Amino acid sequence: MRLRAVVVDDEDLARRRLLKLLLKYADRLEIVGEAANGEEAVSLITSVRPDVVFLDVQMPGCDGFEVVRRLKEKPFIVFATAYNEYALKAFEENSVDYLLKPVEQKRLDRTMEKLRKFAGGPAPGMNDNIEKLLSRLAPPGLRRLKVALGDRIILIDVPDVVYFESRDKYTYLHTSDREYAINETLADLEGKLDGSAFVRIHRSLIVNVSFIREIVRWFAGRYKVKLKDAKETELIAARGYAGNIRRL
């Protein structure tokens, strides 16, 4: 049977090169889509449900690791990467296939042989193997955020963020003395932030735990969260997120 495949790479030349190399296996492999970034990849893979994804690791914004995390059903993943030898050992130990960039035809032959053995279904334990790999190679939480100010871009260290707020269809990052609009959703931020350092207290609020000065019981099972920033901000936690408060 022919396996259905998707190719993902933000570099057009690299994507074209891989697609050209894959033509050799046209009798075994059907390309059903390609994507130029992580967001496109998640949408495409969810829609067409391929048997295998050739996935670039290093992509801006939503990288290859994040793409895999966001997939509810994980196909066989073949990572394309420029990682060093130590990291490649992690790929091998976790039985997730990889291609070292620039991809060579001989190495691709080995990948295709592995795919042939699994005949359209993921390798046994593939989901667990991918999770182990991500835990070893993915960066430990978001460290800094880019903020555009006119023709300037500034970097803000995540530990300096007091809280994130969703308001009027925009997301704002609050430091001790001002706020900045950023191109992230709270849902995306929640997946990237260190869960021990930040807590979601409302569908529109994520708070840096280190800036919490006091938590006070409020009405109807809610809490008031008092912060130790310059404005002495007070936020009301939604009842549905009270469990997050109690776990602090």
Image (cartoon, rainbow, N blue to C red):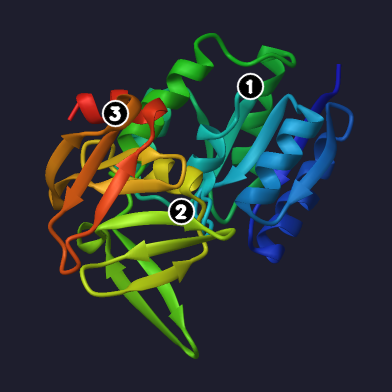
Q: Is residue 55 left or right of residue 30?
A: left
Q: Earlier in the sequence, mark 1 or mark 2?
A: 1
Furthest residue in direction top, as rendered: 124
Query: Disc 3 designates what residue?
Result: 244
Query: Which label lies toward us, 1 or 2?
Result: 1
Relative depth, front residue between 68 and 28:
68
Relative depth, front residue between 40 and 96:
40
Which x, y percent locates residue 131? 42, 25
Label 2 neighbourhood size at 10 Å, few (<14), some (14-19), many (20+)? some
Please tell me whether residue 108 is drawn above or below residue 144 in the rendered image: above
Furthest residue in direction bottom, as rendered: 151
Dividing the image into 4 quarters, which one contains the N terminus?
top right
Name the disc covering residue 57, or none: none
Query: Disc 1 designates what residue?
Result: 73
Label 1 neighbourhood size at 10 Å, few (<14), some (14-19), many (20+)? few
Quarter of the figure with residue 49: top right
For badge 2, the amino acid type reads: Ala
Query: Which label lies toward us, 3 or 2?
Result: 3
For badge 1, the amino acid type reads: Glu
> Disc 3 versus disc 2: distance between alpha carbons?
39 Å
Q: Earlier in the sequence, mark 1 or mark 3?
A: 1
Relative depth, front residue between 209 and 143:
209
Which x, y percent locates residue 236? 32, 43
The residue under the point 12% across, 57% down is: 228
Name the disc covering residue 82, or none: 2
The residue under the point 40% across, 33% down is: 134
Which x, y percent locates residue 241? 36, 29
